[in-house]
Image (spheres, rainbow, N blue to C red):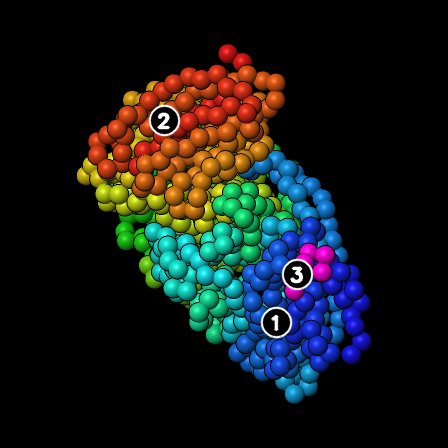
Amino acid sequence: MRPLKCLVPAFALALAAGAPLPAAADTANPAVTAASPDGTLVLTVSTDSSSRPTWSLSRKGKLLIGTSKLGFTLTDGLNMVRGFRIVGSDTASANETWEQPWGERRFVTDKHNEVLVRFQQNDEYGNRQMNVRFRLFDNGFGLRYELPEQPGLKTMKIADEWTEFNVAQLGTAWWVTGLEWNREEQVYQRTPIDSVATAQTPITMRLDDGTHLAFHEAALVDYSAMNFKRAEGQLFRSTLSPSSRGASVIRDLPFNTPWRTIRIADSAAGIVENDLELNLNEPNKLGNVSWFKPMKYVGIWWGMIRGDWSWAEGPRHGATTTRAKQYIDFAAQHGFGGVLVEGWDKGWNHDWFGHGQEFSYTEAVPDFDLKAVTAYAASKKVQLIGHNETGGNIANYEAQLEDAMKLYQSLGMHSVKTGYVADAGGIIAPGDKPGEVRMEFHDGQRQVQHHLKVVEAAAKYQVAIDAHEPVKDTGLRRTYPNWIDREGARGMEYNAWGAFANGPNHEPTLVYTRMLSGPMDFTPGVLSLEGANHAPLASTLAKQLGLYLAIYSPIQMAADFVETLAKYPKELDFISKVPADWSESHLIAGEVGDYAIFARKDRNSADWYVGGVNGSAARDVTLSMDFLDPGKTYTATVYKDGEGATYLTDARHNIAYTTLTLRKGDKVPLWLAAGGGAAIRLHPGK
Ligand code: NOJ
Ligand code: CA
């Protein structure tokens, strides 16, 4: 067979990078190769002796992902795994910078090379075309299937996707179980890579040679979520979340799958400061979204989570007009932009958990005057944050969606928190016939469609969405910047329900796992450091402030009761000032699961903020102020763990405050308590 058009430059790049030639590059199975812009990553795409499409990846000349297969099984036809040959390929590259309307950093650079490989399945197995696009960044990799229009394959009913990832070296993995009932609200496991079961993504790995990897997906649209299933040894395979319709995914051709992605770096910071999935998403489709302003908020929430108040009507009802006004007053006084009110609407009085058929998204309960509260909020320049708990009943929610969003816009509300609490991970979705419903998986194709439907309807009425119990984030905030954040992991709420419920290492693990997917509504700021029945948090007081630097969200809650927040004037001052929108963010110290300290620059001033969270082992760190702007002197207000602080005893409340004068290049020694943290505000001048 003739060498392919792209072979010569690709091989030249591979050789320049010192990569081994692909073993399978013989004339029967010609290989296509491509390299990342600086040659660090080298890809080889081929077919094996059974004509199965394969790929492998090396980094700095060392095998990273060994031979891994590609393909699909179908519910209504011959599989698309064998009988393929490569019939062509095209290469392209890009080097551009784009701007985020809000986020961890203002400008994002997209520098990559790519190759589209065209596979053809021959007659014995079918006569089908399957293209695979591979994109190589110096710190990441993505592949997706592109199914072109073709005779004989109009609709694909995908039983499962057979994308393999053959991790070549031993190491450690941080992961939560995929396909679980409680979405992703689990404590992370840390195991050898070869002991992972079926994981949700992102799954993070540190190989024995120090290379850090995070496997995930980008642009999950009209498809089922990919779970990461260990087949044997260190060979992983995609497995798609199921559907009631038999096939996990049903799509008409042409279509593209989501990207399957790997962040790749020498250090923990390299997988955190990495925009791979954002770069693999389509640009902003909504245009100007300046009606959404990043902000901090308080809410009628912690009282229900702890069980002091109820969502349901009655003597303990949390969402009363009086309390909402009290929270609005507090927000206005302390610079919070929003007040979340849960339990304002009808539908909570019975067992709503996993049913949701009684929820109304437009009708308030009698002791909550929606019009009066929103008008009062507007008079105080505060916004009400809406709440739409569905109990997983998306049939009921979709039927009211337009009316609800229209109402919220008319009341000056620009953000809504949604929720999909349901046992068994099931979603009650509209069926094919009017009035019919079906159960669907919480991150199957139907629920993926649902989330986008909500986000698009909300955008039409200038409403931003904060989704709880969501489908995982895959960078879609680039395309739909009103999809501001999600929960999608075990949040603060668990601390209300038991002593040390989240454990001291939880947040330092989230930074390197869940947070790689996108912003999280973790809801920090429980300054009392206790949940129901005085259950202690695995946190010092300084850690509650450090969370505002460690866990990014453009809406950031101060979760405690306002009466409690008011008892901590110094901490409240920090929370009032810390931004929720940054021009730059850097992980300046940290290791996966152990600790994480960030430096972030305010998008709207010259201030820098430094801080983060520590796990179960106390430690000394020295922070380099290399990131500071040259020629400036900063006054640094430091909140740190006080002497003897530890999450294990009442000493968790010990906090110390100091003021330093700092310049670029200075070194700041800092002691972090067990379960501790720190936060520093750096303001130029005195
Ligand atoms: C679970 C959410 O995570 C929580 O924030 C919310 O208050 C409840 N569901 C009720 O919607
Ligand atoms: Ca939740």
- Which is more toward the observer, 170 or 367? 170
Question: Residue 500: percent from the left, percent from the top?
Answer: 26, 43
Query: In front here: 579 or 391?
Result: 579
Q: Amino acid at mark 2?
A: Lys
The magenta-colored residue range is 15-20
Observer-side mark, 3 or 1, equals 3
Where does label 3 land, which residue?
19
Q: Is residue 405 visible?
A: no
Report which residue position mark 1 lands on: 54
> Where residue 439 sits: x, y (%)?
41, 65
Q: Residues within 10 Å of mark 2 (few under 14, many from 20)?
A: many
**Crowding near the residue tagged with mark 1, few <14, some 14–19, many ≥20 C-alpha atoms within 10 Å:** many
Please say if 248 is above or below 276. Answer: below
For image coordinates 29% across by 42% down, the residue present is: 495
- Tell which residue pokes out farthest to the top in this image: 686
Q: Is residue 211 above or below residue 461?
A: below
Left or right for 43, reference 571: right
Q: Earlier in the sequence, mark 2 or mark 1?
A: 1
Residue 300 quadrant:
top left
Residue 182's label in the rendered image is none
Using residue 254 as the reference point, say whether residue 309 is left or right of it: left
